[in-house]
Amino acid sequence: MPQTADYLVSGGTVITVDEERRIIRDGAVAVRGDRIAAVGKAEELNREFTAGRTIDAKGMLIMPGFVNSHMHFYHTMHRGLAPENLGGMLWSDYVHRYIATVLTPEDEIYGALTILLETLKAGTTTFLEAGSYNPAAVIEGISRIGMRGLMGRRSFDQEFLGHGMLLEDTDTCLKENLAFLEKYRDGYNGGLIKACVDVVGLGRCSDRLYIDSKKMADDYGTTLNLHLAAMFEEVTATRMLSGHRPVEHMYHLDVLGPNTVLVHMVHVNEREIDMLAETDAQVIHCPSTALKISYGNAAFGRFPEMLAKGVNVGIGSDASDCSNYADMIRVIYLAGVLPKDYRYDPDAGSAETAIEMATINGARAIGMDHEIGSLETGKKADVIVITMKRPEWYPLYSEVQNLVYSASGDSVETVFIDGKIVMEDREVKTVNEEEILERCQECAVGILKRSGVEVPGKWPIL
């Protein structure tokens, strides 16, 4: 007798990202409940399963949902307000001095929903967010979109190069982070969105905050998420304060480990790469931000060397005021091509590696590779369907190369998360997109008025 399935996505090319990295043309994925029931040839699965609904995926790509391993929610409300000629610390000082300080919980919620809509419509099913100033309001406010993710409370207790806006004392950071973990330790919205420990990093945290935050993450079985080694100034300042480079400092504090996620990581030397490999720490590369605000990735980035030494590297879109977009396919493109140029070696990056960074590597970075990141029987049914019936996909010889080097997130048509259709034919089913964008713009009017900043640019706005 045939088995039953809720959905059978059939007839497309399946990029599994499983252990064998199989690509199955004329393939299919069966979904039952919140799990993948089977992956294989369409002919076989059509024979083995009776589905409540069969989705014709001919001319489509079927693959795991992307893991956007670094996002900011509240920064969405800064989009277009940061002068583009600042870069690095000056950019961060500007947006936090003039804009972040005037945001309300409603601003954060609608900024979050806006960027989640953007990244969802480009195929992201799971996110790791870098910290909210109003985390309880935000985790509950965003849950209706139906995405999977981790988020926490933004925390830092140390002024760095004059950046002291929204600074808190160490005890407050730890107490509030603990309260958030306690309240949401089992997650929210059926466990889809879970709490993690977020500290800013970037020289803005005391040793005690790093050490106690790592212990907190260990005790609660979650992720410690922080920015590190992004800018040259950070390396100099950390050496002056501690005698060590940023990764070395974390190593000597015993903060590195499999549940430690380090974001940016541009200014890392060979010795530090060995420390990352030894401790199985997780690295997240944000190439679009590194390019836009001049982190020096071409001169100093060592992501190919990290991968070669077995360090797990995921990728993220970062924020809407420093990357300015959350289309993961565009981020995948940069992850694939940039090493070719800055190493003067066309073999330094590859389409396959870039896809891994956006799927199974991202899942591993947040400790969920046993559940998501690949299409395998028994894993969570986080599946995206991408149309290849577009000019940029033709001629179609290699689905992998066309995805990475030719496509954009506009090609994503259908998204399953936890076995439910969250987007179909590019229509998000869980929320009212128009309402969210209208509310986001209403919030923006208030932010512009309260902040007193002027919209930057070289051309007059009449």
Image (cartoon, helix red, strand yellow):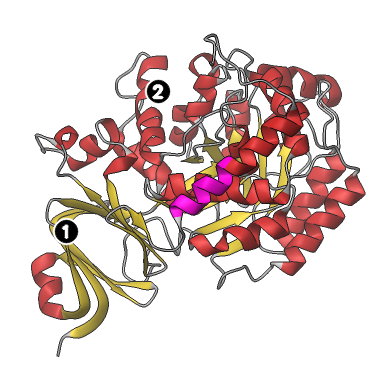
Q: Identify the secondary structure beneath mark 2.
A: helix
Residue situated furthest front in the rendering: 462
- 26, 339: nearer the viewer: 26
Q: Tag 2: Cα neighbours inside 10 Å, few (<14), some, or many (≥20)?
A: many
Q: Is residue 343 visible?
A: no
Query: Nearer the observer, disc 1 or disc 2?
Result: 1
* Residue type marked 1: Ala
Q: Position of residue 157 (x, y in %)?
A: 85, 39
Q: Tag 1: Cα neighbours inside 10 Å, few (<14), some, or many (≥20)?
A: many
Residue that appears at 74% across and 24% down: 93
Q: Quick one: label 1 or label 2, which is nearer the N terminus?
A: 1
- What's the magenta region? 433-441
Q: Is residue 310 visible?
A: yes
Q: Position of residue 427 (x, y in %)?
A: 34, 55
Q: Disc 1 marks which residue?
A: 57
Image height of 333 relative to 420, above or below: above
Which numbered tag is attached to residue 339? 2
Quarter of the N terminus within the rendering: bottom left
Magenta span contains residue 436: yes
Residue situated furthest bottom in the rendering: 1
Q: Is residue 231 left or right of residue 289?
A: right
Image height of 77 relative to 180, above or below: above
Image height of 121 relative to 321, above or below: below
